[in-house]
Amino acid sequence: LRCVHVAGTNGKGSTSHLIASILQEAGLKVGLHTSPHLKDFRERFRINGKPVPEQVVVDFVERHREAFEPVQASFF
């Protein structure tokens, strides 16, 4: 797994999307995680520019619910 971590004060979202687009055009399979979402939680997770299907998110949460609930994690 090769990763690019974008950090800083401003421009992280734009920079991340630009890098993801360049890598995808180069023929790589690209996963992109950004936060926060604006309308739909699935905006946070993209594979080759497409949101992760809703059922994949639902299945993941259901499989790992026991680990999530005690932590009471926020969206951030």
Image (cartoon, helix red, strand yellow):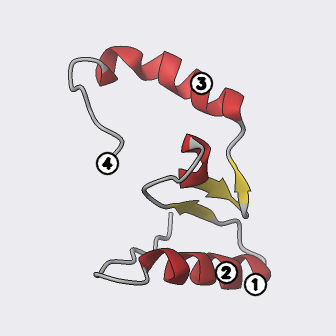
Mark 2 vs 3: CB contact within 8 A = no
Residue visible at 61% across and 83% down in the picture: 18
Q: Disc number at residue 26?
A: 1
User: In 3D space, how far apart are the residues under numbered discs 2 and 4 (Cα atoms)?
Assistant: 26 Å
Q: Secondary structure at mark 3?
A: helix
Query: What amino acid is labelled 3 in the image?
Result: Val
Q: Residues within 10 Å of mark 2 (few under 14, many from 20)?
A: some
Looking at the image, the residue that sits furthest to the left is 71
Mark 1 vs 4: CB contact within 8 A = no
Q: Which residue is mark 2?
A: 23
Q: Secondary structure at mark 1?
A: loop
Frontmost of labels 3 and 1 is 3
Q: Is residue 47 left or right of residue 5?
A: right
Mark 3 or mark 1: which comes first in sequence?
1
Q: Residues within 10 Å of mark 3 (few under 14, many from 20)?
A: few
Residue 74's spot in the image, x, y percent? 29, 37
Q: Secondary structure at mark 2?
A: helix
Q: Is residue 64 left or right of residue 52?
A: left
Mark 2 vs 1: CB contact within 8 A = yes
Q: Secondary structure at mark 4?
A: loop
Q: Disc number at residue 58?
A: 3
Residue visible at 60% across and 22% down in the picture: 59
Residue visible at 64% across and 56% down in the picture: 46
Mark 2 or mark 3: which comes first in sequence?
2
Frontmost of labels 1 and 4 is 4
Query: What amino acid is labelled 2 in the image?
Result: Leu
Mark 3 or mark 4: which comes first in sequence?
3
Q: Which residue is mark 4?
A: 76
Query: What amino acid is labelled 4 in the image?
Result: Phe
- From what the image shows, is residue 1 above or below residue 38? below
Q: Residues within 10 Å of mark 1 (few under 14, many from 20)?
A: few
User: In 3D space, how far apart are the residues under numbered discs 3 and 1 (Cα atoms)?
Assistant: 31 Å
